[in-house]
Amino acid sequence: MENINDRLADLVISYYAEFPNFHEDILHTQEVACYTRIIASGEGLSQKEVSLLDAAAWMHDIGCPVSKERYGNSMPDNQQKVGIEVTDELLKDFKGFSSEEKKWISDVVGSHHNAKSATELSFQPLFEADLIVNILSGYYSMDIAPKLFKTSVKTETGKRLFKTLIKD
């Protein structure tokens, strides 16, 4: 039986491969998807919730390549705005998600850097996974990591992962 998220991952990887220097984008996305699943499952979310979070994790930075072309950067506001457009286009004919689920994924992509939205839209595991990967990859300095942990990591699984992976 074909897994919907495997098809989505394949779609996302194929999309990124159309752009120069795409390897980092794919690796980041894979890491965020992996940690998102670990956190969501560790928090006891249903299989359906884990699957939707996994889908959103695969899509979360989908706006970066076009944002870089259009604006010269992939700053959060730019990539989120473009990400909504790209997500809507890629999911338009994608089978397996309801229109409400597609809308939710698009909303998450358009606000995945916002802690308040993470709570409102229930994508905290993705928010924490992206934060962990961004810290591990040097996007944030290690000086700021403890503050980000205190203010942003709310799940027990995320706290455990953060303490294991991010050494003071």
Image (spheres, rainbow, N blue to C red):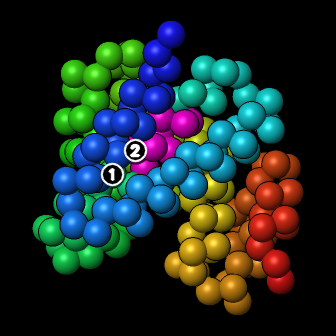
Q: Is residue 108 visible?
A: no
Give the residue type that dot 2 points to: Met
Q: Give the residue pinned by disc 2.
A: 59
Place residue 37 in its image quadrant: top right
Q: Is residue 56 visible?
A: yes
Give the residue type that dot 1 points to: Ile
Distance from label 1 to label 2 (Cα)? Answer: 5 Å
**Which span is picked out in magenta?**
53-60
Q: Residues within 10 Å of mark 1 (few under 14, many from 20)?
A: many
Nearer to the camera, 38 or 71: 38
Q: In percent of the image, x 84 and y 67: which residue is there?
A: 163
Q: In percent of the image, x 49 and y 60: which residue is there?
A: 28
83 horizontally vs 50: left or right: left
Q: Give the residue pinned by disc 1.
A: 62
Q: Give the residue furthest to the left.
A: 70
- The question of residue 63 being in magenta is answered with no
User: Residue 68: percent from the left, percent from the top?
Assistant: 22, 70
Q: In percent of the image, x 43 and y 49: which residue is there?
A: 60
Q: Residues within 10 Å of mark 2 (few under 14, many from 20)?
A: many
- The question of residue 55 being in magenta is answered with yes
Q: In percent of the image, x 46 and y 15: which residue is there?
A: 2
162 horizontally vs 6: left or right: right
102 over 109 or under it: above or below: above
**Mark 2, secondary structure of its residue:** helix
User: Residue 130: percent from the left, percent from the top?
Assistant: 57, 59
Q: Are marks 1 and 2 in contact (CB under 8 Å)?
A: yes
User: Residue 25: percent from the left, percent from the top?
Assistant: 39, 61
